[in-house]
Image (tube, grey):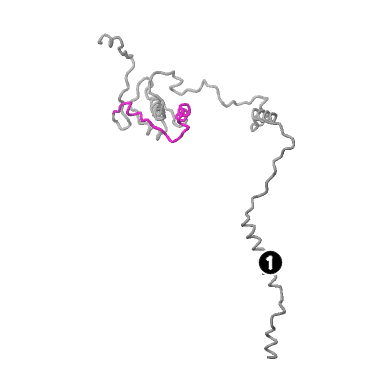
């Protein structure tokens, strides 16, 4: 049994230092497994690893390590990194790993080396996504017109074949019978009141004449 175990020895790279319990922002040493806090946010868009990583890259501001070839002396909690909205590569990894584990991904953090252009965020050799001069054939085009969308709409219209002798009857507005009866009743009462106001009834006794000849 001892010989079987000896065949599967774990060999670590002697040049790589282990980062097990760095100090946090309060100066207390904490294990990496306790610094990573599985977190599930109430936003379904962040349940996918691509959108979650894009959110971290857009929301946080990247800062370089103080000494590029050495481990950081302080590793803050993911909550404070999100509050500060700034962090180095280790802080980015801790926050992203916490969100991915909270969503159910089998995520973990590793550290290594990267080219200088990446660690310093040097974008001088990247192609500009916004060209300064537009091509001659695109100057007169309307930016609000999408040719692909027009082609799709034309294809849809071509596939539709109208049927002969078929039409959809137009329905009138919905009316309430109660409101209609109430409106007619009000109109009738107003007409009767107007008639009474202008009608002279000769059958009524003339009280002034009775007083004179009484």
Q: Looking at the image, which residue is at 71% across and 39% down?
A: 167
* x then y, percent, for residue 116: 44, 19
In the current view of this chain or complex, which residue is farthest to the bottom?
214
Compared across the picture, whether 157 is left or right of 110 comes to: right
In the picture, which quadrant includes the N terminus? top left
* x then y, percent, for residue 110: 38, 21
* x then y, percent, for residue 171: 67, 46
In the picture, which quadrant includes the C terminus? bottom right
* x then y, percent, for residue 66: 37, 25
The answer to which quarter of the image holds residue 202 is: bottom right
Q: Dot 1 surroundings within 10 Å: few (below 14), some, or many (20 or more)?
A: few
Tell me, yes or no, whether the highlighted magenta stretch contains residue 64: no
Vertical order, 101 against 214 (above or below): above
Front residue of this view, candidates 131 and 184: 184
The answer to which quarter of the image holds residue 212 is: bottom right
Compared across the picture, whether 6 is left or right of 134 comes to: left
Front residue of this view, candidates 122 and 49: 49
Q: Which residue is mark 1?
A: 191
Q: What is the number of callouts on the image?
A: 1
Q: Looking at the image, which residue is at 38% across and 27% down?
A: 94
In the current view of this chain or complex, which residue is farthest to the right?
165
**Disc 1, SS:** helix
The answer to which quarter of the image holds residue 22 is: top left
Front residue of this view, candidates 43 and 18: 43
Vertical order, 153 against 193 (above or below): above
Vertical order, 116 against 163 (above or below): above
**Chain part drawn in magenta:** 29-57
């Amino acid at each position: 049994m001892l010989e079987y175990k000896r065949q599967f020895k774990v060999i670590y790279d002697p040049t790589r230092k282990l980062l097990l319990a760095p100090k946090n922002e309060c100066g207390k040493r904490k294990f990496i497994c306790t610094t990573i806090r599985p977190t599930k946010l109430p936003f379904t868009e962040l349940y996918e690893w691509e959108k979650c990583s894009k959110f971290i890259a857009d929301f946080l501001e990247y800062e370089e390590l103080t000494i590029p070839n050495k481990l950081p002396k302080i590793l803050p909690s993911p909550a404070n990194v999100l509050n500060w909205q700034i962090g180095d590569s280790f802080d980015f990894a801790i926050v992203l790993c916490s969100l991915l584990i909270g969503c159910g991904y089998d995520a973990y953090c590793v550290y290594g080396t990267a080219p200088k252009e990446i660690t310093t965020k040097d974008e001088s050799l990247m192609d500009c996504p916004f060209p300064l001069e537009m091509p001659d054939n695109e100057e007169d085009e309307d930016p609000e017109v999408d040719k692909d969308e027009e082609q799709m709409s034309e294809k849809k219209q071509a596939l539709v074949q109208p049927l002969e002798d078929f039409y959809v009857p137009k329905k009138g507005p919905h009316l309430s019978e109660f409101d209609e009866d109430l409106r007619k009743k009000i109109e009738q009462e107003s007409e009767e009141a107007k008639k009474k106001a202008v009608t002279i009834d000769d059958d009524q006794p003339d009280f002034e004449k009775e007083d004179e000849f009484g």
